[in-house]
Image (cartoon, grey):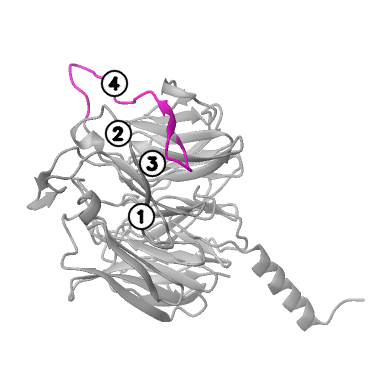
């Protein structure tokens, strides 16, 4: 006997809700740019498949994070010179609350603003961190739990371009990564670092309930000048019964015990001396883990390096190294989905499907985008979603034997920015059976 139609619909909706995943941080529920969400559209526009579109105060690179019926975002408010944390209703797009976390300055260079780090939530709290080293934690109803200026205890973040690492909540700790220059300096008229403070690069573990330090792990490196800087975010995974923290930057990838911060493995540097000098380049992409392998992208059209999670000791030799003329990424963090890595080449505007243990390129394809990508790919429901500077969302089929472009969806405001602070850099989030797409002026919720 078949159940009544209304009961069948209710059961179907309940099952869908039970299978839904949150998007609690900038790289999603598994910290690899992927989700198990289903039934997401390949084709859409600002007027098609849009459940709602909310106005945002201003653009930034921060990714919308989603927990249940709430969406969180950071943004600068230009006329008031404020950095705010925002909360929207995930079902309607209504702004539920906004909180001023910091005031007095929004931009230090023409590429980005101080609201670049993404928020993070664990369902009990949401933490907003800004590039001026000010952070605050709120419950999901917008009540302040704690606020802290990390400059007072650890100094201002000393990165040439505006700090963009995102905080991570994992295993009951809040992690903040600061890979920075080892001395104070000035860039485009703004002082970086704090005189008299220890300028070592570090990973800070904070009690998320109180905002107080639990421990600080100094991360040494032989990198110099700009190579000391990293805009990556820590990534966590389980391996051999241990919670592992991966840190990329300072010309290397390191593996740490997430509970203590202690380092136990380090990849041999990709920045080898040549012609009497080293290349001094910052690192942007975060690591990604899949099938027991960690992937890290060296900067400026260099190779991609693979490292086994079983590695131990210093100067670990890579499992494999890509041909930099084929697989590379200067800015976008790769994704892992159903047994494959997907590498979006920020500059060449290509996508590669790569086998984790061997580095074999299963396919590579050109998107045809006229603008650069600096957001990272999101892979969900058998599709790869990527947004370029203009706000065009490219959708490519995941898996298969060859590259297949499914659609190009123009979601931007038509201004076609080319790498300045008005460019779309926010990766796409997937939750509640929807895509959450941030463009220059809007936050879109797109779904079937």
Magenta residues, start to end: 256-279
Residue 263 belongs to magenta span: yes
Residue 365 seen in this snapshot: no
Residue 145 belongs to magenta span: no
Which comes before the other along the chain, label 1 or label 4?
4
| Residue 93 in the image: above or below residue 65 | below
**Of the residues tagged 2 and 4, which is closer to the observer?**
2
Which comes before the other along the chain, label 2 or label 4?
2
Q: Nearer the viewer, residue 386 or 204?
A: 204
**Of the residues tagged 2 and 3, which is closer to the observer?**
2
Q: CA distance from mark 1 to mark 4?
A: 32 Å
Question: Which quarter of the picture shows residue 197?
Answer: top left
Q: Position of residue 61 (x, y in %)?
A: 32, 58
Q: CA distance from mark 2 to mark 4?
A: 12 Å
Q: Which mark is residue 250?
A: 2
Q: Position of residue 181 (x, y in %)?
A: 20, 39
Which comes before the other along the chain, label 2 or label 1?
2
Disc 4 packing (10 Å; few <14; some 14–19; many ≥20): few
């Amino acid at each position: 006997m078949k159940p009544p139609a209304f009961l069948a619909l209710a059961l179907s909706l309940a099952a869908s809700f039970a299978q839904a995943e949150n998007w609690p941080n900038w790289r999603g529920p598994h910290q690899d740019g992927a989700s198990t969400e289903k039934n997401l559209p390949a084709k859409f526009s600002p007027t098609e498949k849009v459940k709602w579109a909310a106005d945002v105060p201003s653009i930034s690179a921060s990714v919308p994070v989603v927990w249940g019926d709430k969406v969180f975002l950071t943004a600068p408010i230009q006329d008031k010179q404020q950095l705010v944390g925002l909360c929207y209703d995930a079902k309607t797009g209504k702004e539920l609350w906004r909180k001023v976390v910091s005031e007095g300055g929004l931009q230090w260079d023409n590429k980005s603003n101080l609201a670049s780090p993404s928020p993070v939530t664990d369902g009990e709290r949401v933490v907003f961190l800004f590039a001026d080293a000010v952070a605050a934690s709120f419950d999901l109803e917008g009540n302040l739990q704690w606020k802290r200026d990390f400059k007072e205890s650890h100094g201002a973040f000393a990165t040439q371009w505006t700090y963009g690492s995102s905080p991570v909540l994992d295993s009951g700790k809040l992690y903040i990564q600061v890979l920075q220059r080892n001395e104070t300096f000035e860039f485009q008229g703004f002082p970086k670092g704090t005189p008299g403070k220890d300028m070592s690069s570090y990973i800070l573990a904070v009690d998320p309930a109180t905002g107080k330090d639990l421990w600080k792990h100094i991360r040494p490196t032989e990198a110099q000048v700009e190579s000391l800087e990293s805009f990556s975010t820590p990534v966590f995974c389980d391996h051999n019964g241990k919670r592992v923290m991966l840190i990329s930057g300072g010309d290397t990838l390191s593996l740490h015990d997430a509970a203590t911060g202690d380092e136990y493995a380090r990849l041999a540097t990709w920045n080898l001396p040549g012609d009497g000098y080293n290349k001094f380049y910052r690192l942007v992409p975060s690591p990604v883990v899949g099938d027991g392998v960690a992937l890290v992208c060296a900067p400026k059209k260099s190779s991609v390096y693979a490292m086994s999670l079983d590695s131990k000791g210093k100067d670990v030799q890579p499992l494999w190294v890509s041909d930099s003329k084929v697989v590379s990424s200067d800015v976008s963090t790769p994704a892992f989905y159903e047994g494959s890595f997907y590498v979006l080449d920020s500059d060449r505007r290509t996508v590669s499907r790569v086998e984790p243990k061997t580095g074999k390129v299963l396919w590579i394809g050109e998107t045809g985008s006229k603008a650069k990508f600096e957001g990272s790919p999101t892979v969900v429901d058998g599709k790869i979603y990527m947004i370029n500077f203009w706000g065009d969302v490219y959708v490519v089929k995941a898996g298969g034997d060859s590259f297949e472009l499914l659609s190009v969806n123009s979601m931007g405001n038509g201004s076609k920015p080319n790498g300045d602070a008005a460019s779309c850099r926010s990766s796409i989030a997937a939750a509640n059976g929807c895509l959450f797409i941030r463009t220059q002026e809007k936050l879109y919720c797109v779904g079937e």
